[in-house]
Amino acid sequence: MSSSNVEINPFTTKAYSANYFVLRKTAQNLPVSKQIPQLLSIIKQHHIVVVVGETGSGKTTQLSKAILLDDEFRKSGKKIALTQNRRLAAQLVADRIAEEMDVQVGNVVGLKHRGRDLTNRTTRLDVVTDGSLVAAAKSDVDLQNYGAIVIDEAHQHTVPTDLLLGLLKELAARRKDDLKIIIMSATIDADLFLKFLPGSVLKTVGGRTHQVSVSYLAEPPTDDTIVETILQVHLNGRNGNILVFVSGVREIHQIIVKIQKALNGPTARFGPLEIGPLECWPLHATLSPEAQDDAVETISPVPQNGQLGRKLLIATNIAETSVTLTGVTHVIDSCKVKGKIWNPRNESWCLREQWISKAVARQRAGRAGRTRDGMAYRMCTEGGFQEQMLEHSVPAIMEGDMLNECLSILKMGRSPLTFSYIVAPATETIVKALGILYLLGAVDARGESLTPLGKDITSLPVDVYSAVVLLESPRFGCSDEVISLVSMIEATNGGSDLFSNPSDAEEKAAIQAIREQFRHGSGDHITLFNIYMAWTAARTTNKADEFLSKNKLKGSVLRYADQIRLHLFRTLLKVKNWQLNYLDATKPGYHVQMLKALAAGNHLRIAKRKSSNEPRWYVTSRHGAPAKLTADTNLGAVSRGNEWVIYNEFHSDGISKHTIRLVSAIVPELFISVRPEYWYDTEFLPKGQIRDQLVNIIAGMTGNTENFIRGGMPKNPAGGQS
């Protein structure tokens, strides 16, 4: 090409790179590309467009890019927001669009998710998680910066996406002249969106050009069916990597261990010349961003001894998103998913394994046909698929606790009870959520407006309870330490994803012994804090790698905790009246102050030991429900010091058994003193041993009689008895 014919990138004023032309040719071959002119015409003529197309059509990257390049839209000076429902998807989509446009992320193409913001005045197309756009709406409910909002993967009905749909329904009326709304879905269930959004029109785009053959089992699966299928595909299948969908993290690790035993060591089933290398990569939401990126971006192993090398990705539903996983031509689908279901009556979570929907199964299978023909192996019989699976999944908003959602809706000036939900949660759930938020001090007694504390909570990217702990921590002089603790809770999924995954019983025992070395007598919270501080100390002496190896800790998780810590610190600095303060680790009561801060935000999550004969069983103070400590919690020998505990999670098996997770011992005088306005209302506590003992303790603390306390003490204990 002569210099006079060099194409100039209008966004950089430089010549396009050679890579740009390669990617442009690839993009032009996507099914959606031929329909872009028609799509743009429909978008210009209509305020709201629902675009339906199968995975692999190219709609995620090509449509929003086409809107950005449209002369008429560019003259408006407005931005485009393209939502993704997971951080990983947002990262990869932003990277791909930026590469296709021959620009850097952060210049023209923006990216925003929790802990990372590469959007600014120069970014015109912001790829954001749906949660980040909800956060933006809290401060600008009209989203005035954006002239087009593209909601991707709307069929997945994540809670933030469903909230955005309700908000956009209102915005459609207020910003009819300067806002385009595009809803994109991979399923044909478009009627729900068309009925919900008045004036919307439907456009269906072509799907992938590659064929995916689907096979079923002749008989129901056994525990080893997935592993055997993986090995058979690796030995005999066509070229390409393997993606396995399972229901949870435990299942991922079980498969990895079985595959490694089948291929390596004394239990190997194949000789070195019989089978090629197979590299196993876990992929799930509780991995650190660093580990997720490694799993997706790492290339396949090279062939050895003439045998094909493959990459094996074993994933939860995180891999259902709009991300193209390069090289995948085989999908093995367990057809299962684990979902957290909230029970508002006893405020417990139930983690339940269940069948996926047929729509999700089709989307999972589509991962095998993104770049060439592929195969999908469903780990169920065809009869089971047809008879046991629903057509569509239950929206997540119907199964969550609505705490953060109620705060977000109130911050946007709406009522959670009358908000325009595309699929409404149960009224009981909303009412219970507002009641909890009132007891936390976040909303007024009628649940109609936020308190100053509630407004501050909405600015923090953590759950409501942890947000209160962070905001209350300065009054106990430990805000710096609490930021570290909360960051560890967030990064480690409550401590469950911190140590390396043991491959056998011996390694499991070794990790348990290491955990005991860090254990603090009070329990899990300070133990997590101790691990973080020990790692931080090792970094200052350049011995972090040695520390991680010796203690079998995941460096990516601790580095992620560090990222969260920095993000929380920067966010808290913007909160009015919040102060950064530190504890003196050499003084007595160092950890007690941190427990006080925990109690200030978790006073609704207190439990008392059932009896000395059942040392691992406790009864919750809110509902009188018996719950057992998990195996990871060690509070030491039975004593008055661990008769009462504070916990972060209350789980149910869905039938009768309950457990409490992330637990620390705390004396009642301490948790009563930090939240007296709550504990003095003893009439709201369950009748029985817990109420009786608390009344006795409060009487001792205040000098009032038990009868006086049972009759309802004044909020200010100094009022006392007359």
Image: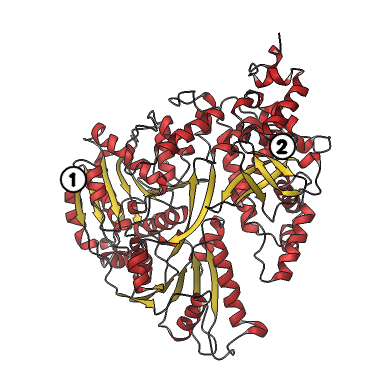
| Residue 343 in the image, given as x and y percentages of width and height | 49, 44
Label 1 to label 2: alpha-carbon separation: 57 Å
Q: Which mark is residue 225?
A: none
The one nearer the camera, 519 or 13, is: 519
Secondary structure state at the residue bearing disc 1: helix
| Residue 646 in the image, given as x and y percentages of width and height | 67, 40
**Is residue 634 among what the camera can see?**
yes
The image shows a total of numbered marks equal to: 2
**Is residue 78 among what the camera can see?**
no
Residues under numbered marks 1 and 2 in contact, where contact means CB atoms less than 8 Å apart? no
Is 620 left, or right, of 186 in this rendering? right
Image quadrant in which the C terminus is located:
top right
Q: Which residue is mark 1?
A: 44
Q: In which image quadrant can residue 326 be found?
A: bottom left
Secondary structure state at the residue bearing disc 2: helix
| Residue 71 in the image, given as x and y percentages of width and height | 22, 47
The one nearer the camera, 665 or 285, is: 665
Is 204 left, or right, of 472 in this rendering? left
Up the image or down, 676 lies above or below 376; here it is above
Q: Earlier in the sequence, mark 1 or mark 2?
A: 1
Camera-nearest label, 1 or 2? 2
Is 685 left, or right, of 127 in this rendering? right
Q: Which residue is mark 2?
A: 595
Callout 2, which amino acid? Leu
| Residue 465 in the image, given as x and y percentages of width and height | 58, 37
Callout 1, which amino acid? Lys
Q: Residue at x 39, y 31 (%)?
A: 412
Q: Residue at x 15, y 45 (%)?
A: 45
For mark 2, does the 10 Å Cα neighbourhood hold few (<14), some (14 to 19), or many (20 or more) residues? many
